[in-house]
Image: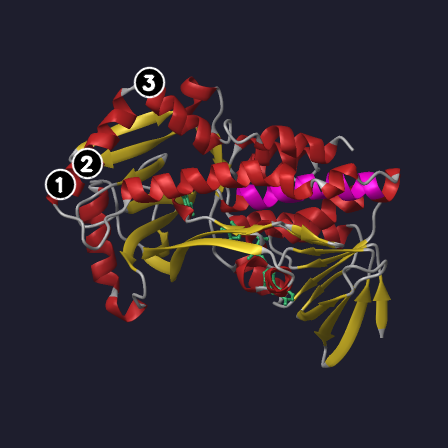
Amino acid sequence: MTLRTSVGIIGAGPAGVLLAHLLHRAGIESVVLENRSRDYVERRVRAGVLEPGSAQLLRDAGVGDRLDREGLEHGGIHLRFGGESHRIDFKELTGRGIFVYGQQEVVKDLVQARIDAGAPILFEAEAREIRGIDEQRPSILFSYQGHQEWLECDYVAACDGSHGIGRATMLARGAVMYERNYPHAWLGILAATPPAADELIYAYHERGFALHSMRSPTVSRLYLQVPSGETLEEWPVERIWSALRQRLNEPLLEEGEILDVGITAMTSLVIEPMQSGRLFLAGDSAHIVPPTGAKGMNLALADVAVLAAALTERIKGGRSETMSSYTVNCLQRVWRAEYFSNFMTQLLHREPLEDDFDNRLHLAQLRYLTSSSAASRSLAENYTGAATGTVALAKSGLDS
Ligand code: APR
Ligand code: PHB
């Protein structure tokens, strides 16, 4: 069987489902292919910080109601180190706060909007091959319910994350991959315990980094730096809580049932260009950031705001300028976020061979960041997206 549509979208993560939604609002048909089940993508625990521009993008797209009801707005973060704790006041420094709202909640809202619109989204449909991206009608070969099918389209958007076929196809066509691997990973837990503080705590400790975050007034999200390659067997529950207590140094932290636990590797990666012929990469398929700067979901959403605007201009308006400059329009923002995420990672993590000298350098930089208003503002601008132009880009995706 061959399906036909205007834009073939691979992947129902935040990038894929937001792109489908924005195109639908612009009157453009698309089909989303997702190799996992709906239940799986809606439950997968991922990051959870939205810049104000990303939150506004979702609101403007008509999918911000639950975010506004259940999302937690934060005016700043805490940096904790060497027995000190300092608040970086984002609102005061930039006039903007951030929202804590799980990535799977964003995905849930957008999948629901897609289903309410009666628009096609196929779960357990695995894209196997992308063909003909230099021709008028490229197509995607996919397997679905035991059959091989074709999706014929005008454009292909590979929103298929870091292990998808979009990136592999682009690399086979000569795209360049810039990559850095870190010697760390994050062990993350979701725990049934009320957040110990009302905002995020980024803690630098001699034994390694720890992060206190949350998902609701009764559920906390907590992370620990562990060496890359570490396995969960090395982290029995008691060791996790004891390391969190030691590194976060937070007397109000209480243990609770662990609802989810996992270890995530840390990588920085950018593919250039992000487009070739009629194939476009967006989100994790095009770039990865370590989670320390909380940029992954924001980059994915901003990419598809740009891509939706470009495709709309091309398909509805017959103009192709924005489409041909998709890569250029994204890369400046992407590299800014790469820089910031790498900076936050180096600032807050201990490298395996670091000594006391390095420890004192970390502390000196943390003291500077928390005592100089210029340095604090710089961090606040980057964290909230004020320095990366996400808001303007998000808007350009909607005005079309
Ligand atoms: N066919 C169909 N679907 C696929 C295929 C394939 N061959 N390969 C991957 N997928 C699906 C995955 O199952 C996943 O649901 O593509 C989706 C990609 O979604 P994400 O990994 O969430 O990527 P993206 O939408 O770009 O969002 C980036 O995710 O990892 C976090 O920190 C990252 O917050 C950022 C966000
Ligand atoms: C999260 O809440 O999952 C989270 C918060 C901040 C980060 C990374 C993840 O930097």
Q: Residue at the spot x=49%, y=24% of the render? A: 96
* Residue 369 drawn at (x, y percent): 29, 27
Mark 1–mark 2 CB contact (< 8 Å):
yes
In this rendering, the answer to whether 65 lies above or below 118 is above
Residue 92 in sight here: yes
Label whose residue precedes the other's in the sequence (1 or 3) = 1
In the image, which disc is placed on residue 357?
1
* Residue 18 drawn at (x, y percent): 67, 47
Image quarter for ligand 1 equals bottom right
Q: Is mark 2 within 8 Å of ligand 2?
A: no
Pointer 3 local density, CA inside 10 Å: few below 14, some 14–19, many at least 20: few
Question: Foreground: 193 or 369?
Answer: 369
* Disc 3: which residue: 373
8 sits left or right of 79 in the view: right
* Disc 2: which residue: 361
Q: Secondary structure at mark 2?
A: helix
In this rendering, the answer to whether 259 lies above or below 384 is below
Q: Quadrant of the N terminus?
A: bottom right
Pointer 1 local density, CA inside 10 Å: few below 14, some 14–19, many at least 20: few
Q: Amino acid at mark 2?
A: Leu
Residue 100 in sight here: no
Q: Amino acid at mark 3?
A: Ser
Q: Secondary structure at mark 1?
A: helix
Q: Nearer the viewer, mark 1 or mark 3?
A: 1
Q: Secondary structure at mark 3?
A: helix
Provide the residue span drawn in magenta. 298-314
Question: Foreground: 306 or 233?
Answer: 306
